[in-house]
Amino acid sequence: MRVAEAVGRVLHGHGVRHVFGVVGSGNFHVTNALVAAGARFVGAAHEGGAASMADGYARTCGRVAVLSVHQGPGVTNALTGLTEAAKSRTPMVVLAPEATAPLSNFFIDLPALAAAVGADFHRVRATHAAEDAGAAYRAAAGGATVVLGLPLQVQNAATEPWSGPVPVVAPTPSAAPQVEPLLAALQAARRPVFIAGRGARAARAPLTRLADACGALLAVSAAAKGLFAGNQWNLDVAGGFATPLAAELIGAADLVVAWGSTLNMWTTRHGELIPPGAVVVQVDSDPAAFGVNRPVDLTVAGDVTAVAEAVLGRLDADTTGTTDAGWRTPALAQRIRDHGRWRTVPYRDESDAATIDPRTLSAALDDLLPPDRTVVVDSGNFMGYPSMWLDVPDVAGFCFTQAFQSVGLGLASALGAAVARPDRLTVAAVGDGGFVMSATELVTAVRLALPLLVVIYDDAAYGAEVHHFGPDGHPLDTVTFPETDLAAIARGYGCDGLTVRTVDDLGPVRRWLAGPRTRPLVIDAKVCVAGGSWWLQEAFRGH
């Protein structure tokens, strides 16, 4: 057996069923080995798109994604998407062919590249190919983005035959989390709030039970939107996207427990959201995350689910455990029902004859779209509108590509999400700048024939820069553009294309939704420069 074949078989044996990429000579054999073993290859138009597809796939289904690229430029083309994945702790293995001779045109320092963006690096050896591939997979399954170097001179070398089964690796026993101080803080609190982040995405059930036991309200960071969907005490997203009611209630808390969240500047509005007198607790499996963004009063090291269950166990056993609902009153439950969604917050519609208010657009789409949806949001001025006005059914229904704050990743990420959940309608919310950067992947969208709706919030500008620099009188010629028929561009790629300037223009969307949805629909929504994008003010304070 050759090394490339062994790597493909091992990854498939560990459960890999999809591999995203662009094939060249360096990754031809390992990709074909995965396909021969039973995996599906999803070919992208560009390695950058392939990286984002793998990222969106893993975030949506929770399984390890595999990205396969050519050596040298194939790796560097994928670098922005790879960086987003690494910063988001996306479980991903990057099959990176490696030219190890420094004089080769394809040579790059892969270990240094991986380290520079926060990814792990592993390298396959001829004598231990199956072992090395398995180790890379397990590292990814543990929450790392792993660059797996495949030296060109090694891939064709003979190695020990491998046909499975996958060796069972017993998890390393972890010490029981020390929860007594957290327990005491919960019992003393009258107005507790839980803020769950990316590290709590799998912990809905224990966190909900614990919140019920101690009378806490529930909120999330943007990366965990949907985690508590449907719960009557859910305040939705904290920080810049928080509703006025959520900001008011979090601002009145006497205890804030961050579960798998570092309480960064976005989640806390630069610290102003959390009241000065509140006790702040941070629960995280990575002690290095403690206090990285703001001082905290108490830290608990451990897996979020394990910590929550340990506290629940102590509350059940402790006769002094609180049964007082605190601020969970019928009156507050009614306020959350009446004012807990952006749809219930009044605003002045700034639509005109030629453009539609992005809030009005988002609300109308929320009414049209089926509840079973995956919403993928690119970066840019527009991003608050779909994040705040489009509901999602659960935490898997929201993919937020903001860890690296790169424009242009959302469309391809949505393709990966659609592959992961073809049973749901995938909605890619993008700005016109990000769309133009990534439009080449519409070719892939058409080939896949997956249910995909692309909504372009088209303000004919890099809107963030307009908002940032315009008020100070700076010239904006470098960040504003002539109106472009983006729907026509989409039709050129084989999609259905629709231009929207008013709510009435959305009629064809209803017809598309009722049909087979085998061709992607791209909506070029000509949006006005509406008020309300206050999240940009928060963002620019950090620049």
Image (cartoon, helix red, strand yellow):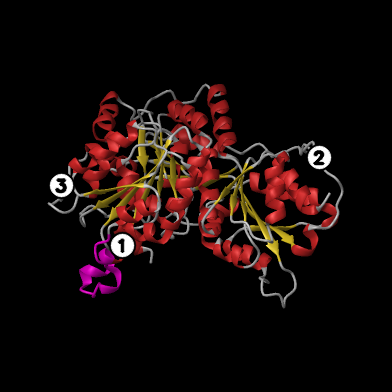
- The amino acid marked with disc number 2 is Ser
Task: Judge by depth and name the residue closer to the eye, 147 or 258.
Answer: 147
- At x 44% / y 60%, what residue is drawn? 406
Q: How many marks?
A: 3
**Is residue 503 toward the left or the right of residue 124 in the image?**
left
The image shows residue 83 at horizontal and vertical percentages of: 54, 59
Magenta segment? 466-484
Label 3: few (<14), some or many (≥20) within 10 Å?
few
Q: In which quarter of the image is residue 365?
A: top left
The image shows residue 99 at horizontal and vertical percentages of: 72, 68
Q: Is residue 112 above or below residue 44?
A: below
Tag 3 secondary structure: loop
- Which label's residue is closer to the chain start, 2 or 3? 2
- Which label's residue is closer to the chain start, 1 or 2? 2
Let me know if residue 468 is in the magenta part.
Answer: yes
The residue to which callout 3 is attached is 349
The image shows residue 347 at horizontal and vertical percentages of: 17, 45
The residue to which callout 1 is attached is 464
Task: Judge by depth and name the residue closer to the eye, 446 or 75.
Answer: 446
Mark pair 2, 3: CA separation:
63 Å
- At x 57% / y 36%, what residue is drawn? 307
The image shows residue 542 at horizontal and vertical percentages of: 38, 63
- Which label's residue is closer to the chain start, 3 or 1? 3
